[in-house]
Amino acid sequence: MKKKDSLWKVNYIIPDTRNVNIIIYDLLGRTIRHLDLKKVQAGRHKYKWYGTNDFGKQVSTGIYFLQITAGQDTQIQKMLLLK
């Protein structure tokens, strides 16, 4: 992941067509952002998070967790958002 001006770029690779979900949680486990991308083709993909919630509002500085689920595979990464 790369950070630039409250922007997180997350790169991921899908080996075959799968349903993909991206969820960002805060430290209390509350869902901040949820994307259900449905069927994603195999290959390299990029998701950009601008530090906003599902309503487009900026979230506060803090620690967040990004969860990417592709089919049966799940990966979780910790992010530090600074403003």
Image (cartoon, rainbow, N blue to C red):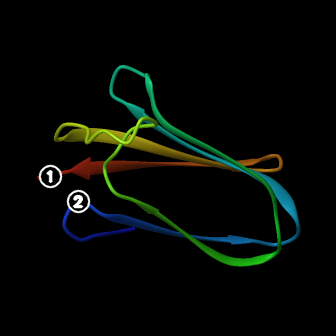
Q: Earlier in the sequence, mark 2 or mark 1?
A: 2
Question: Could you give the CA–CA distance between mark 2 and mark 1, rounded to whole angstroms?
Answer: 7 Å
**Residue in the foreground of this view, choosing between 76 and 30:** 30
Q: How many marks?
A: 2
Question: Is residue 70 shown left or right of residue 34?
Answer: right
**Dot label at residue 33:** none
For residue 35, above or below residue 9 = above
Determine whether label 2 and label 1 are within 8 Å by CB: yes
Question: Is residue 72 shown left or right of residue 35?
Answer: right
Question: Which residue bears the numbered disc 2?
Answer: 6
Question: Which residue bears the numbered disc 1?
Answer: 82
For residue 80, above or below residue 41 = above
Please tell me which residue is depicted at 43% across the width and 22% down the height of the picture.
Answer: 30
Please tell me which residue is depicted at 83% across the width and 50% down the height of the picture.
Answer: 71
Please tell me which residue is depicted at 88% across the width and 70% down the height of the picture.
Answer: 16
The label nearer to you, 2 versus 1, is: 2
Q: Secondary structure at mark 2?
A: loop
Tag 1: residue type? Leu
Residue furthest bottom in the image: 43
Tag 2: residue type? Ser
- Say which quarter of the image contains residue 32: top left
